[in-house]
Image (cartoon, grey):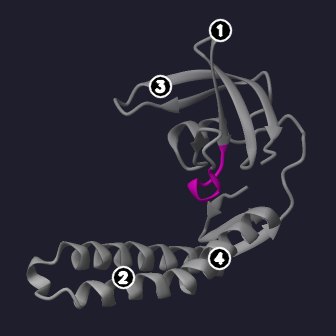
């Protein structure tokens, strides 16, 4: 579970280990693979019209950007425990809300950094309008957040439980 605040990112040990493994792969075997692709494409001739070479260089750029992002994230990471099941919304919690008092119109999401997001659940950052509106609220309380058009929206917190990957 993560929350970025004052340049510190809070992670569970599981999330930290997952990101560390990704960084090790991208910094080692993946760099070797992309270098091999670039070398093979270079041997095909004229680089100005070599689509394989340009695609490999673009892939290399994206990969290096991800290495820099992970390096910075992990440098400022603090490893901690998952949040307690206290009924208070906090980063690392799966939150279910109802819009404008309509308890049939619900949304369930993980309140966490996108770095921790999986494909199994929608993720909202604690710094997003909705995330900051619900953060710190108790189950049963109402929360407000600002919509892109500047109007306020109201939601009711129905459930908040620690995320279990």
Instruction: Classify residue 138 by image quadrant.
Output: top right
Q: Could you tell me which secondary element the residue under label 3 belongs to?
A: strand
Q: Are discs 4 and 1 less than 8 Å apart at CB?
A: no
Which stretch did the figure color magenta? 111-117
Residue where numbered disc 2 is placed: 37
Q: Residue 115 colored magenta?
A: yes
Task: Report the mark closest to the observer, 1 or 3.
Answer: 1
User: Which dot, 2 or 3, sits closer to the camera?
Assistant: 2
Q: Are marks 2 and 1 in contact (CB under 8 Å)?
A: no
Residue 153 lies left or right of residue 56; in this view the side is: right
Figure quadrant of the N terminus:
bottom right
Q: CA distance from mark 2 to mark 3?
A: 51 Å
- Residue 135 or 76: which is nearer the viewer? 76
Q: CA distance from mark 4 to mark 2?
A: 28 Å
- Give residue 70's position: percent from left, percent from top: 56, 74
Q: Nearer the viewer, mark 2 or mark 1?
A: 2
């Amino acid at each position: 579970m993560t929350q970025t605040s004052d340049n510190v990112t809070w992670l569970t040990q599981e999330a930290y280990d997952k990101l560390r493994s990704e960084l090790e792969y991208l910094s080692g075997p993946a760099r070797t693979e992309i270098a091999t692709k670039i070398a093979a494409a270079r041997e095909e001739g004229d680089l100005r019209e070599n689509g394989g070479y340009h695609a490999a260089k673009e892939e290399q750029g994206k990969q290096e950007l991800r290495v820099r992002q992970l390096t910075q994230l992990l440098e400022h990471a603090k490893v901690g425990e998952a949040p307690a099941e206290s009924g208070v919304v906090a980063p690392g919690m799966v939150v279910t809300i109802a819009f404008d008092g309509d308890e049939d119109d619900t949304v369930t999401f993980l309140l966490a950094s996108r770095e921790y997001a999986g494909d199994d659940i929608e993720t909202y950052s604690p710094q997003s309008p909705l995330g900051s509106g619900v953060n710190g609220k108790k189950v049963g309380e109402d929360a407000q957040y600002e919509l892109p058009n500047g109007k306020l929206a109201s939601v009711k917190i129905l459930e908040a439980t620690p995320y279990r990957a």
